[in-house]
Image (cartoon, grey):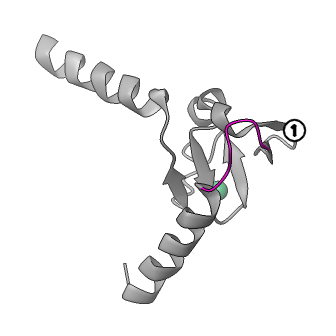
């Protein structure tokens, strides 16, 4: 990633993490939801995603790599799941 791109990312990140828990934000599905319910933001589509959207028809499935992870329980659970799979193998 080039330096300029990184700086732009930081600016976007600062902007979106300023949201309050109960702010209404647009999601990838064309609906709206509370900011606290979203776990990621796509800076190409300019939309937020809930954990459900991420795991079903989110940008991840579309090979869109313009996702910013927000602080959300989802990512912690995801990492834990991955970890427990590793331990089983
Ligand atoms: Zn996207």
Q: Which residue is mark 1?
A: 31
Q: Position of residue 56 (x, y in %)?
A: 63, 30
Nearer the observer, 17 or 28: 17
Image quadrant in which you'd find residue 14: bottom right
Position of the C terminus by quadrant: top left
Q: Is residue 28 left or right of residue 53?
A: right
Q: Is residue 53 above or below residue 4?
A: above
Which residue is drawn at the image coordinates 56% and 38% (left, top)?
39
Inspect this view and state whether residue 89 appears.
Answer: no
Which residue is drawn at the image coordinates 87% and 44% (left, top)?
30
Q: Which secondary structure class fits the magenta region best?
A: loop
- Image quarter where ligand 1 lies: bottom right
Q: Position of residue 84 (x, y in %)?
A: 22, 16
Residue range in magenta is 18-23
Q: Position of residue 35 (x, y in %)?
A: 70, 40
Image quadrant in which you'd find residue 12: bottom right
Which residue is drawn at the image coordinates 66% and 31% (left, top)?
37
């Amino acid at each position: 990633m080039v330096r300029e791109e990184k700086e732009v990312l930081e600016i976007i990140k600062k902007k979106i993490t300023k949201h309050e828990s109960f702010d209404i934000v647009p999601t990838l599905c064309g609906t709206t939801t509370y900011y606290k319910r979203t776990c990621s933001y796509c800076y190409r589509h300019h939309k937020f995603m809930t954990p459900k959207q991420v795991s079903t028809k989110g940008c991840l499935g579309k090979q869109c790599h313009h996702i910013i992870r927000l602080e959300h329980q989802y990512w912690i659970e995801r990492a834990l799941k991955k970890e427990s799979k590793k331990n089983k193998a």
